[in-house]
Structure formats: C-alpha cells, structure tokens
Amino acid sequence: MPDYNKIIAFFDEYIAHYKEFLQFEYLKLDMINNNQIEKLSKSLSAEQALIMKTNAYETKRVKLLEGMTGTFAEIAANAPEEYSKRLTEQHKELSDIVFRIKELNDTANITVTERLKKIQRKTAELDVYDGKGTLKREHASRLAISKNV
C-alpha cells in the first residue's frame, strides 16, 4: 500500500512551489505591461531557477508515484477514504494554480508578440524625400524592392 501521508506531504511542498512560481508569473507580467525590460531581463535567472526546481519536483513526483496507475485525480479518488478528500483538494488546488500560470504565460506571450509586431511595423517605415524635397513615408520592403539598394 502506498504511503499516502508521504504523498500528501510531497504535494503540499509541490503546491507551495507552484504558488511561488505563480507569484513570479504575476511579477513578470507586470514587468512586461510596464515596459520594465531591464528588470525583466534580470529576472530570467530567477525564472530559470524556478524551472529547474520544477524539474526536480517532477522527478521526485514520478519516483514517489512509481507503481501507481492513473492520473493524480484517479489516485486521489481511489485512495482510502481518510486520504481521498485531502488528495482531491490538493489535486484541485494544483490544477487551478497550473492553469493560472499557463493563462498568465499565454497573456504575456500575446502582449510581447503584439508589441514586437508594432515595433516591426514602425521600424519598417522610412522617411524618404522625392526629387522636389517632399517628405513621404515608405514601407522599407517596398523601397528596397523598387530601388537597387
């Protein structure tokens, strides 16, 4: 019989780690939204440390649940009654946190992608002058195609 107390203790740790990761994701999105590029760049090592810690927890989780079949939800549902409720609560909490992290990551990716598109559009425009000194705004790719540059 699996050591359910050990499993519950592990998932308490695991959830605490993901809560820390979630807080980081909120901070990261805030940095993105406030154009704090330098601060965001400096936070990459903290993010890398969280990712490495997540990988270590994943390895530990796989080893802990070795020999058990089914998903975490199924393991919780099939556990003895005195453990099932707590494991089910942990499963829901962990699922909610992981979903929120994914949602924040998706939002950050969309925001960054849209800003990069704006930068590309802006940098693709060039001020050019015709032979009479009149200023015109041209798209850089059209200009490059129309002239031998």
Image (tube, helix red, strand yellow):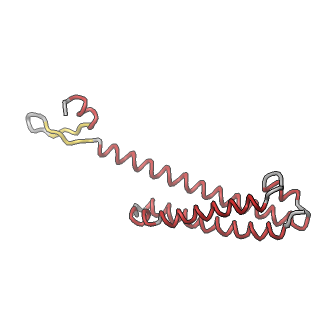
Residue at (49, 49) in percent of width and height: 110
Does 99 sit left or right of 44 as displayed?
right
Residue occupying the point 8% across, 35% down:
132
Where is 136 relative to 115, above or below? above
| Picture quadrant where residue 103 is located | bottom right
**Quadrant location of the N terminus in the rendered image:** bottom right
Q: x%, y% of residue 96?
A: 69, 59
Q: Is residue 47 left or right of residue 99?
A: left
Q: Whole-percent x and y of residue 47? A: 53, 63
Q: How many badges with numbers are in the image? A: 0
Left or right: residue 90 versus residue 135 is right
Spot the residue most to the top.
146
Q: Position of residue 69 (x, y in %)?
A: 83, 52
Residue shown at the point (47%, 63%) measured from the top left? 44
Residue lying farthest to the left in this orientation = 132
Q: In this rendered view, identify the residue nearer to me: 75 or 56.
A: 56
Q: Image quadrant for the C terminus?
A: top left
Residue 131 is drawn in which quadrant? top left
Can you say whether 69 is above or below 131 in the image?
A: below
**Is residue 85 depicted above or below 123 in this figure?**
below
Which percent across, then down, holds residue 73? 80, 55
